[in-house]
Amino acid sequence: MQITYIQNKGIVIGDNEIYWNEKRSIIRNYLENKHQEDDRIITMDAYFEGEESKTFNQKRDIYQNFNSDENLFFLSYDENDEFIEFEFHIDIDVQIENINIKSGQELTEIIKDFENNSHKVYEIEQGNYLIPSLKISLMDDEYMGGDSENTLSYFYIAKDMSHLEEEIIE
């Protein structure tokens, strides 16, 4: 299943244009209510020992094997149920500007394509890349727990990436 990413606006899935801040109920209707709701409060205390307690309210819908294709993607929402993030885990196929990226594609090839289109790519950790100008994060299979180094396994876009941009070291 291919999606199209419209920079600073949202995504297109099939015939459905889904924009940042669009209401969850509307998106669910676009996608024929074929989701599994995954709302929960997550405590991150184990990761921030000795610091003030950190919790966040995760609000997301999980779509698996959407339109009878093998795929897995998540749509996340803010406290007002407005669309803010998209994650693709299985069968990634995304059109961004004049670049098409797919699951299993070599990340070095993808990075080169973005850099040739004037987008700076930062390696946050080995196998974890950030493209701030497009608000995109890419991860390889090994980083996501698999066996294949340097092949695309995870695609993430967000309305706001400031939480990830803090990780950039020039």
Image: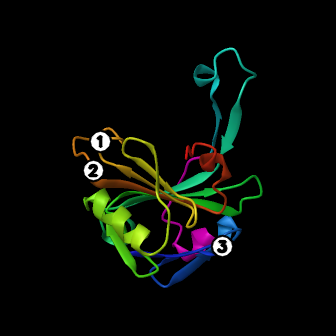
Q: Nearer the viewer, residue 44 or 101?
A: 101
C-beta proximity under 8 Å, tags 1 and 2: yes
Callout in the foreground (2, 3)? 2
Q: Residues within 10 Å of mark 1 (few under 14, many from 20)?
A: some
Check the image and name the residue furthest to the top. Answer: 50
User: Residue 49, image x and y in percent?
Assistant: 64, 16
Looking at the rendered structure, the kind of residue marked 2 is: Asn
Q: Residue at x 66, y 69 (%)?
A: 20
State the residue position of label 2.
Answer: 150
Q: Which quarter of the figure has residue 133?
A: bottom right
Q: Position of residue 146 (x, y in %)?
A: 27, 41
Quadrant in the rendering for residue 102: bottom left
Mark 2 Cα shell of 10 Å, populated few (<14), some (14-19), many (≥20):
many
* CA gap, disc 2 and disc 3: 37 Å
Q: Which residue is mark 1?
A: 142
Which residue is more in the foreground, 159 or 112?
112
Which residue is at the far bottom? 15
| Viewer-side residue, 4 vs 98 | 98
Residue 138 counted in the magenta span = no
Residue 110 x, y percent position in the rendering: 34, 65
Q: Helix or strand or loop: what does disc 3 sit on?
A: helix
Work out whether mark 2 precedes mark 3 in sequence or the reverse, and give the earlier one.
Answer: 3
| Residue kind at label 1, given as amino acid type | Glu
Which residue bears the numbered disc 3? 26
Q: Earlier in the sequence, mark 1 or mark 2?
A: 1
Q: Which residues are magenta?
A: 27-38
Q: Amino acid at mark 3?
A: Ile
Which structural element holds mark 2? loop
Separation of residues labelled 3 and 1 (CA atoms)? 36 Å
Residue 84 in the image: x percent, y percent?
Answer: 65, 61
Q: Nearer the viewer, residue 86 or 70?
A: 86
Residue 82 visible here: yes
